[in-house]
Amino acid sequence: MTPKLETVMSADDTEIAYERAGSGPPLVLVHGTTADHTRWEPIRPALEDHFTVYAMDRRGRGKSGDADEYALGREVEDVVAVVELIDEPVILFGHSFGAICSLEAALRTDNLRGLILYEPPLPVSDHDPDTEDILDEMAALVDNGENEQALIKFFREIPRVPTAELDALRSAPNWPTRVDAAHTAIREERARKGYEFDATRFSGLTTPTLLLAGSESAPFLRDATNVLNDALPNSRIVILEGQAHAAMNTAPELVIDEVLAFVREPGDKTLDEEGLSGETEKLLADVWEFPLFEALFGRRARRFGFGGEIPDGPLQYKSEKDPLPLSELEQSLLIASAVGISGWHFGIPYANAEDGLSTYSLRFTGRPTPTAAGIGTVELFYTDDDGVYFVSTRDIDPEGGEYRRTVDDVEDLLRVCRAHTTTLQDARLDIPRKSPHISGHNLWDANVEGSTLFMPVADVGEQLLSFIIMIARNGITVYDDRAGRYAGELDTYFESGLLNPERKYPLTELEQYALVTNAAELGIMGHNIVLSLQAIGLGGWMFTGMFPPSLMGAFADQGVPGLGFRFQRSDDWAVPNPIGLDDYYESVCPPYHSDMHAAAASLVEKKFGDGGTYDPAPPGPYPKEVMETAGEYSDEFVDAVGEMAQYIYDTYGKFPATVPTILMRPLVQAQHLDTDYYDAHFGPEGYLDTHANHLERWHPDEVA
């Protein structure tokens, strides 16, 4: 279909041009700085096979008009004008500066079905370059007629486009058009730097949102994507591996695949965008109503799945069935049972050391797994045949403060979990089938084809720092019982009465406290998944027979990258210490903070800063007048907490001193149960009715 050039009048009477082509649901494309609608040529033909594509020229570009006065708000009105001329809900896809325009437009229109934002350069990062001198130099080049040099300076010094990607841009047919529009980059960059991002404005933007980010992009772009993901209630990040800021040019198929996966075209084996089918609703109702005590007493470690084989011994057996991966619905239910959002939790209602509302909790996000003092450090990784994923829900506020307790809430529960799932790798986690990576008795069954392996993690460092705050609120000091001294130079705080030298908490005991509470949370999360297996009729079990350092990446130098965690190492330690997965799950210690004083300050900011746990402005579990009674910590108090934490880090080279910073131990594997094996060895008592009927009900197409 030949593209058709059309126009629409914007709010300030500027004519905005767009090309329309293709067939299917509407997709509006909004280009970035210096480009026009032709920047989408590497991916537009493929998109037109699935969508009616509206590729607009932003003002001052292509066939669009311009105005004497420029403002970001006018750009936003232009996008809204195109979106609202379409008579059905739109998928809006913005790149770079165009993504900022699209993000703001999403607040001004109700005609969106979905939002795709590729690295909106929000000015929120410490890594964001100071561009005023660069812009002055660009302006001088433009005034001298050296537009191309000005444009090259822009790409190299602001988005910091890698040389290979810049070469791809320069070789594209639309490069001369970009050169002609070099002057517009100056005004747009000044508008970008003047843009004030307020996360609270987007807390109600529930439009499903895909955030695309290049693994090789400049740090300030990565930071902006993470900040935006935290602000949006229904978003997820997809990392474009090996790409930077212009993957449409360098990896067009990758971008196309992610767009199509996000939109979930009819016919895909995903949940229906228009709602759940009647049969699916019946399945979910049966799962929701499955008796708790039947799950408790019917639970078994059912390890033998489709495609399994016990190679020898008295129970030798080989499955005659091919491995069958879990469906998205099956996976989503298990994930929701672990980290789904159930509403607000109630925090600690009273602490005798505080006059107002207790400030012990770090988060009020309620999930199915209990958490010590409402600290809530636990998150979930999982892997299947198609990839490795991270589900992060601990900092998501419940939508509208609603509590999810009935089967009518299931669709929302699953949607939120999917929206906050990030794809980290595009194949199953590759762990060698040998010691020490996998225990001998799990070599035949762990992380096998068709299975889904769930890997909960807890941040013991954040747990410990929160516990130090809790005991310090009671005047208790950390006492290093290994060295026989107080944890830090604390005389000042003893003299002021902030801390009581007679009230000492042994460091090793406090760290065991943090470790055990986190371990309990991991175990309960795993048990939630296992109980859900019984209700759905899936096989699987909770186990510890895979070595956590292998899973997290301690053997990366030996060709076993695992999840890619960062580790600290010392000849004095039996095993390296995991401290975080950069950009996704980072503990409160260096290098993620300059020192432990900064780490303590960051935790306090999370509690009392704008949009924080005890900020009375955003919604929360208690009325504003109750939230306002939560007393903020004094500078002296924060200094004291930082002093004790810094002592631990300086003395032992890590935080915590005696236990791992990040804990991964109990795992859960889910798979389709081969009932033939259980019939052969145990008879009909070997499994539940849900297992016997699972294939017929959940996978009727697989039944011969």
Image: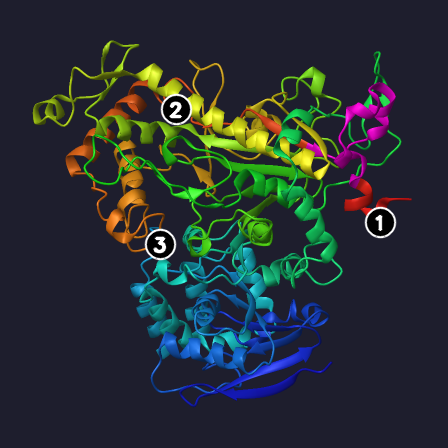
Quadrant of the frame with the C terminus: top right
Q: CA distance from mark 3 to mark 2?
A: 29 Å
Give the structural element (helix, strand or loop) at label 3: loop
Give the colour scheme of this rendering.
rainbow
Nearer to us in this view, 494 or 214 = 494
> Which label's residue is closer to the chain start, 1 or 2?
2
Q: Quadrant of residue 592?
A: top left
Q: Amino acid at mark 1?
A: Asp
Marks 1,2: beta carbons within 8 A:
no
User: From what the image shows, is residue 206 above or below residue 32?
Assistant: above
Q: Which residue, given by chain and number where applicable, does mark 1 sit on?
A: 701
Residue for point 27% across, 53% down: 624
Question: Would you say residue 418 is visible in this rendering?
Answer: no
For mark 3, what is the residue?
Answer: 619
Of the pair 633 and 492, the residue shown nearer to us: 633
Q: Residues within 10 Å of mark 3 (few under 14, many from 20)?
A: some
Q: Is residue 670 above or below residue 163?
A: above
Please give the residue where the numbered disc 2 appears in the rendered image.
514
The N terminus: image quadrant: bottom right
- 3D distance between C-alphas at marks 1 and 2: 48 Å
Q: Position of residue 626 (x, y in %)?
A: 26, 47
Q: What segment is highlighted magenta in the picture?
A: 670-694
Question: Where residue 474 sits: x, y (%)?
Answer: 21, 26
